[in-house]
């Protein structure tokens, strides 16, 4: 490792039907790479990687044109539309063996590209993951802000660890991504999964702007699906809730049973009423508790099927803790330029 080796940064940009905005934002990403490299913070071999998520417009053609224009632009194309989360994952996995750090960012200019400087600084100061956090949501509609913020609270309540007001604008080191690759689940919710990997992290706040052009691909339906996926992928707490309800209903049922028997003894009821009420209360409670217990087993099976790593080692006393930067002037240029 050379003494002046600098980290190679890959900016990972998911793109779905973004022909309107891509020609505007692509040069901004490139400019940022050049600024950072010019200041000596990253290697000149850094890249912008566009992930075409099965667009039906000219997005892929634009990406190919960009790649032909400048070697710093790279593109990969998914065989079909798989959604934002999968597009980001594909890009990160593609990048992880070819760079030292990645920054994932939307291609619509909503995430402030300027925050990358602080992200890289945090990385150089020791953070392996740097979360971009929205300082304010003034440009979002009240509805979007309200639903998004309630969602973070709900997720937290459901036992999933997420960084408040953090979307998918973040820096992740290649080292963390190597471990992240061991999370083999197919239902992915990146912002909930990245914290599971651990390692030192930091946050950087930024103001979220309006889309530069084009329109959002996240209508309410997709947002709700993402929210539901977030909860069910990260937590089996909803199942535990069934058990809790079961115990609660059983206790209430017990009170009702005592009341029904008392009413029957006092002669305030028609024949057979008390016994019917007792059976309903008893069965209702037993059924919910049984469902809950079954659910606990299903929940455990569910977590087992994810084959998540059981531990991740971040350091060993017999290994130096220095970061292994991919050489700036490696003798084998094919290693790093990754020309398409
Ligand atoms: N995106 C994607 N696949 C999809 C939908 C969106 O790769 O199926 C990309 C999109 O091109 C953009 C980012 O994900 O770069 C965020 O999408 P968008 O801006 O539409 O969502 P919003 O910011 O409105 O939540
Ligand atoms: Mg957007």
Image: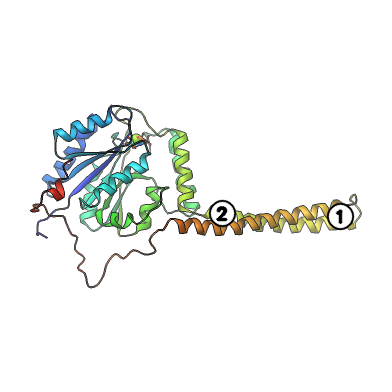
Could you tell me residue 284's position as x and y percent?
71, 53
- Residue 42 percent across, percent down from the top left: 15, 49
- Horizontal and vertical percent position of residue 162: 41, 51
Q: Quick one: label 1 or label 2, which is nearer the N terminus?
A: 2
- Foreground: disc 1 or disc 2: 2
Q: Which mark is residue 97?
A: none
Mark 1–mark 2 distance (CA, rounded to whole Å): 36 Å
Q: Which mark is residue 263?
A: 1
> Label 2 neighbourhood size at 10 Å, few (<14), some (14-19), many (20+)?
many
Name the one closer to the observer, 266 or 244: 244
Quadrant housing residue 136: top left
Q: Quadrant of ligand 1?
A: top left
Of residue 6 and residue 288, the one placed in the foreground of this image is: 288
Q: Residue furthest bottom?
A: 318
Q: How many marks?
A: 2
Determine which residue is flagged by label 2. Answer: 239
Q: Residues within 10 Å of mark 1 (few under 14, many from 20)?
A: some
Tell me, yes or no, if residue 60 can be seen here: yes
The residue shown at (48%, 44%) is: 228
In the displayed structure image, the side of residue 108 where residue 295 appears, left or right: right
């Amino acid at each position: 490792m050379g003494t002046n080796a600098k980290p190679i940064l890959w900016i990972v940009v998911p793109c779905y039907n973004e022909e309107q905005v891509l020609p505007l934002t692509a040069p901004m990403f490139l400019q940022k790479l050049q600024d950072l490299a010019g200041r000596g913070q990253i290697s000149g071999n850094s890249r912008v990687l566009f992930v075409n998520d099965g667009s039906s417009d000219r997005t892929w053609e634009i990406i190919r044109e960009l790649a032909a224009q400048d070697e710093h632009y790279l593109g990969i194309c998914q065989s079909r539309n798989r959604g934002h989360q999968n597009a980001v994952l594909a890009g990160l996995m593609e990048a992880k063996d070819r760079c030292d750090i990645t920054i994932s960012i939307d291609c619509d200019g909503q995430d402030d590209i300027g925050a990358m400087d602080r992200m890289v600084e945090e990385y150089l100061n020791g953070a392996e993951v740097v979360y971009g956090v929205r300082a304010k949501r003034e440009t979002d509609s009240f509805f979007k802000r309200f639903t998004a913020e309630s969602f973070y609270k709900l997720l937290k309540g459901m036992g999933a660890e997420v960084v408040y007001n953090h979307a998918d604008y973040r820096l992740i080191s290649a080292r963390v991504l190597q471990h992240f690759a061991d999370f083999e689940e197919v239902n992915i919710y990146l912002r909930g999964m990245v914290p599971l990997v651990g390692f030192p992290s930091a946050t950087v706040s930024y103001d979220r702007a309006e889309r530069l052009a084009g329109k959002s691909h996240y209508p309410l339906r997709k947002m709700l699906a993402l929210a539901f996926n977030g909860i069910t992928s990260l937590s089996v707490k909803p199942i535990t809730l069934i058990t809790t309800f079961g115990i609660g209903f059983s206790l209430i049922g017990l009170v009702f049973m005592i009341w029904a028997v008392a009413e029957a003894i006092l002669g305030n009821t028609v024949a057979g009423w008390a016994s019917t009420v007792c059976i309903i209360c008893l069965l209702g409670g037993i059924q919910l508790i049984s469902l809950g217990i079954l659910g606990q087993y299903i929940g455990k099976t569910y977590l087992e099927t994810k084959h998540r790593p059981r531990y991740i080692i971040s350091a060993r006393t017999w290994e130096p803790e220095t970061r292994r930067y991919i050489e700036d002037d490696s003798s084998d240029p094919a290693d790093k330029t990754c020309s398409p």
